[in-house]
Amino acid sequence: MIPKIGIDLGTANTTVYVAGKGIVLTEPTVVAVDELTNKILAVGKEAKDMIGKTPGDIKIYRPLREGVIADYKATLEILKYFLNKVKITRFFKPILVISVPAGITSTERKAVIDAAYEAGVREVYPIREPLLAALGADLPINSASGHLIVNIGGGTTEIAVISLGGIVRWESIRIAGDKFDESIKEYLRRKFNLAVGERTAELIKIQVGSAIPVKNNNNEHIMEVRGINILSGLPVNVKIHSNHIAEALQKDLREIIAGIKKVLANTPPELVADIMEKGIILSGGSALLRNLDALIYEHTGVPTYVADDPLYCVARGTGKIIEKLDIYRRIILSHK
Ligand code: ADP
Ligand code: MG
């Protein structure tokens, strides 16, 4: 039997779906490169664990951070690594469905296809991320009804209206989880003279982050954070509240909302009517930010829901396609 695999090659995380098994693996989309020899030393979890611990000539980076495949060699190594990890050898060449950004250029698309063949796949089908996210969120994407999906990952937010299995309108913004972390860092520096690392900022966001100020003040909204006071240079502990994070993220979230409004404004009225009825669906890891659905509803007037297991929507979408290649033939062909 020919193995069939789906890969969500995200800016922050890569997730692999194997037909007949489901999601088998998820690891950071990170590579460690030896700058002296230009060799890739590690990929995935192992590379991420090296962050902050490497000598100067080893560089850890995220080749898809901007949502584009800018680095062919790194993409190739990532694909090889994940295929190898799920024990797909060149001997059993797999069929691969892989997520790509909605705004992918033909050059980038070709790079993904070339990298996939070089990594040893039999056939490769790059499918745009919003379609996969919508499929993975169980939206009936082939129906003649409009759906608005907002996939908020690490590097990018992709907003798309989908109808009849195709993307009708879309917008991609480079504001998502990474920018949130950056804004939290900046805010803490400004407000508390507190310097924290990227990973601490992310942890704060996940633990006490909120998109809107919270009303009651219990412990679940407070986190004690250790950092360096930038004036004294000494370590300090500061209590961070959910409402601080809501304030820190306000500007970024406004831009995401502006993107959603722009897409809505450009969508044919019949489809807007469908969306008003069915709501906006949020996917991607950053959809887990507390109260983001409420904030979007407040500013758009459209009911907003977070998909089940939003981190895995795109991977589940690739899975749906590879499990039923015949049913989704039209989508695959429309991506050729
Ligand atoms: P990508 O598809 O770009 O690889 P993901 O969909 O995997 O991104 O989402 C990764 C982002 O989700 C990261 O920025 C991470 O900090 C964020 N994230 C994960 N869990 C949460 C959470 N509980 N609250 C807020 N953000 C979260
Ligand atoms: Mg993603």
Image: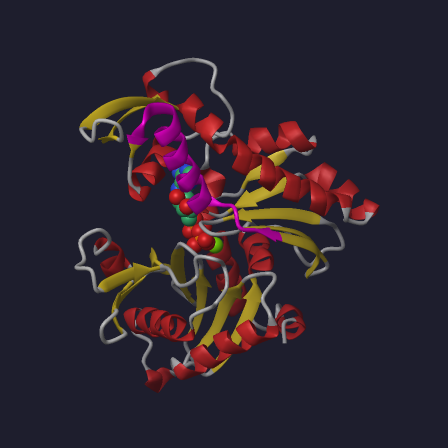
Q: Is residue 30 visible?
A: yes
* Residue 251 position within the rendered picture, expressed as x and y whole percent measured from the top left: 54, 34
Q: Which residues are magenta?
A: 172-194
Q: Is residue 324 visible?
A: no
- Total numbered circles: 0
What residue sits 25% from the left and 60% below the top?
47
Q: Quadrant of the C terminus?
A: bottom right
Closer to us: 106 or 52: 52
Q: Does 188 lie within the magenta span? A: yes
Q: Is residue 104 left or right of residue 247?
A: right
The vertical placement of 89 against 314, above or below, is below
Farthest residue to the bottom: give it: 91
The vertical placement of 47 against 216, above or below, is below
* Residue 221 position within the rendered picture, expressed as x and y whole percent measured from the top left: 37, 21
Q: Quadrant of the N terminus?
A: bottom left
* Residue 262 position within the rendered picture, expressed as x and y whole percent measured from the top left: 71, 44
